[in-house]
Structures are given as C-alpha cells and as structure tokens.
Image: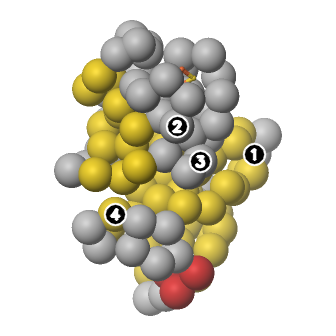
Amino acid sequence: MSGQYHVVAATSELEEDGQMHVELNGEEILLCKHQGQFYAIAYHCSHEAFTLEGGLLQDGCITCPYHGAEFSLHDGSVQAPPAFEPIKTYAIRIVDDTISINTEPA
Ligand code: FES
C-alpha cells in the first residue's frame, strides 16, 4: 500500500529554488521547488545531521550548507562527499495548487 498523502502547502508558497521546513508524522522534511518541480527530502544532512535548509539547489541536487555534501533531490543519493549515506526522500503529489506528502515508504 502506498499510505496516505497529507496536504502540507500550496504551490504558490514556494518560489523557484524556494525551500520550506515541514513537520509531518514526526518526520522533519525539507520541501523544495527546483526547475519547476517539487521535492520532499530529509531536513537533516546524513553527514553530521545539520540542516539542509538554505543549501544551494543546482542541477537536480542540494548542497549541504555546512560541509558541502551533495544529494540528489530525486532519490536522496550522495553525489559528493563528505556524506556517504543517502538522505530520505518522500513521495509527493500535486493536486490543483496543493502539495501533499506521503511519509510512508513506497
Ligand atoms: S553536515 Fe552536511 S556535509 Fe556535513
């Protein structure tokens, strides 16, 4: 089963390369808009658990503002060190102008 989606924001709340901290079902999530797409990823870096908020969004990746690790927005995979563990990503759904996130694994 794919679990439930929960509305977290309106699409108009995020500008291009905008970011928003979301708490849902006890999980801290960073909602991002990049290249016209919305992504929901872990709020904390897998390196030393600092926050990814404010990290540069570029070429489908986010760069951690602390030590420069890069993660794919699509699947959370590490694209540059010093992190070596992926970050979590969340399923996202856009209906009309609302953004919903599913915190359960696909
Ligand atoms: S905390 Fe993100 S790279 Fe170190």
Query: Do the residues under discs 2 and 3 have CB atoms within 8 angstroms?
Result: yes
Q: Upstream in the sequence, badge 1 or badge 4? A: 1
Q: Tell me, what colour scheme is on the image?
A: secondary structure
Foreground label between 1 and 3: 3
Per the image, label 1 sits on a secondary structure element best described as loop
Foreground label between 1 and 4: 4
Give the number of callouts.
4
Kindly identify the amino acid type of the residue bearing the numbered disc 3: Glu
Question: In the rendered image, which residue does mark 4 sit on?
Answer: 34
Q: Upstream in the sequence, badge 1 or badge 2? A: 1
Q: Upstream in the sequence, badge 4 or badge 3? A: 4
Examine the rendered structure and indicate whether residue 72 appears above or below residue 16.
above
Q: Distance between the residues labelled 4 and 2?
A: 17 Å
Residue 100: where, in percent of width, then height?
Answer: 55, 66
Foreground label between 1 and 2: 2
The 10 Å Cα crowd at callout 1, few under 14, some 14 to 19, many 20 or more, is few
Q: Distance between the residues labelled 1 and 4?
A: 24 Å
Per the image, label 4 sits on a secondary structure element best described as strand
Question: In the rendered image, which residue does mark 2 sit on?
Answer: 65
Task: State the image quarter where residue 104 is shown.
Answer: top right
Foreground label between 2 and 3: 2
Kindly identify the amino acid type of the residue bearing the numbered disc 2: Pro
Q: How far apart are marks 2 and 3 (CA)?
A: 8 Å
Q: How far apart are marks 4 and 3 (CA)?
A: 14 Å
Q: On residue 53, which mark appears?
A: 3
